[in-house]
Image (cartoon, rainbow, N blue to C red):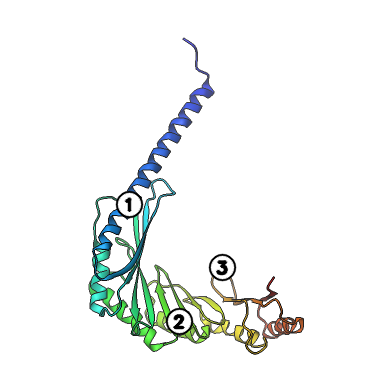
């Protein structure tokens, strides 16, 4: 009998291992796809669901997950929204996956704003406990959009909250900071996307240090907005930092004035001109 070289045996083992991994990936792919198909079919039957998108994630063997993005119909009461979210999260399908993430959006402030809550069945999300807890957060987020009527979207993730406004970012940032401070519930990263800038800070910090962006962009000519503006003090940053890109046709003396103003304020700032 012909002897098999040692390296051939190793190669054979590697080929076999690769085949096992490939088979596992195929099973994961099939599980995630089947789960997504079955859950999408379920959502089709739900009268409270306006739109949805169900996406399987099967790129990593043994880590099958599905992301469902769901928008509820307008005009639903707090109780109806609460009951619907619980029903959607509790629905069981035949296939088993590692994690199902639901991003459920419902209207607020008479349809002028939208709230999105992340729901992960089986997780320890402190906002998704019993019905009274969930209802509290439905009411609380809706109330936040009423108290700060420039908010057009409010999103609560596992440990983060972000808001979108068509107005200036800083007033909304102070409102979001107060919202989280009064009841953190695991929210640690805060952000606001505004018409004038994007602000990012941590819950144990304050957005006050980010207000300097207004001094910098105020030096732009009337009616001119930055091409990009981000002010952040989120970790790993150790201090409030500013990143502003001005329109390409901004006069050099304006750019220089902004840089000098940042130096006067003692804040680190990158002032660049759009390409």
Q: Earlier in the sequence, mark 3 or mark 1?
A: 1
Q: Give the labeled residue for mark 2.
A: 177
Label 1 or label 2, whichever lies nearer to me, is 1
Tell which of 29 and 7 is nearer to you.
29
The quarter holding residue 153 reads bottom left
The spot of residue 219 in percent (x, y) is: 67, 87
Helix, strand or loop for disc 2: helix
Residue pushed farthest right? 253
Q: Earlier in the sequence, mark 3 or mark 2?
A: 2
The spot of residue 6 in percent (x, y) is: 52, 21
- The CA span between labels 1 and 2 is 36 Å
Circle 1 residues within 10 Å: few <14, some 14–19, many ≥20: some
- The CA span between labels 3 and 2 is 19 Å
Above or below, 103 against 39 in this view is: below
The disc placed on residue 236 is 3
Residue at x 23% of width, y 77% of height: 79
């Amino acid at each position: 009998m012909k002897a098999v070289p040692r390296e051939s045996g190793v190669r054979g083992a590697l080929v076999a291992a690769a085949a096992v991994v490939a088979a596992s990936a195929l099973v994961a792919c099939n599980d995630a796809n089947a789960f997504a198909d079955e859950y999408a079919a379920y959502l089709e039957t739900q009268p409270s669901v306006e739109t949805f998108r169900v996406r399987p994630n099967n790129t990593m063997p043994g880590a099958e997950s599905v992301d469902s993005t769901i928008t509820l119909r307008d005009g639903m009461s707090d109780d109806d929204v609460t009951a619907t979210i619980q029903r959607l999260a509790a629905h069981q399908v035949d296939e088993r996956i590692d994690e199902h993430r639901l991003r459920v959006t419902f209207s607020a402030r008479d349809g002028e704003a939208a709230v999105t809550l992340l729901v992960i069945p089986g997780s320890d999300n402190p906002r998704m406990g019993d019905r009274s807890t969930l209802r509290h957060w439905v009411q609380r987020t809706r109330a936040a959009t009423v108290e700060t009527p420039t908010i057009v979207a409010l999103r609560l993730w596992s440990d983060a909250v972000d808001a979108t406004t068509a107005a200036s970012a800083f007033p909304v940032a102070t409102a979001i900071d107060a919202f989280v401070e009064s009841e953190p519930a695991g929210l640690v990263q805060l952000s606001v996307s505004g018409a004038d800038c994007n602000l990012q800070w941590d819950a144990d910090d304050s957005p006050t240090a980010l207000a300097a962006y207004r001094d910098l962009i105020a030096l732009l000519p009337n009616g001119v907005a930055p091409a990009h503006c981000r002010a952040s003090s989120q970790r790993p940053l150790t201090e409030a930092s500013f990143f502003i890109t001005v329109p390409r046709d901004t006069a050099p003396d304006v750019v220089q004035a902004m840089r000098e103003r940042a130096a006067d304020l003692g804040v680190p700032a990158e002032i660049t001109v759009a390409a």
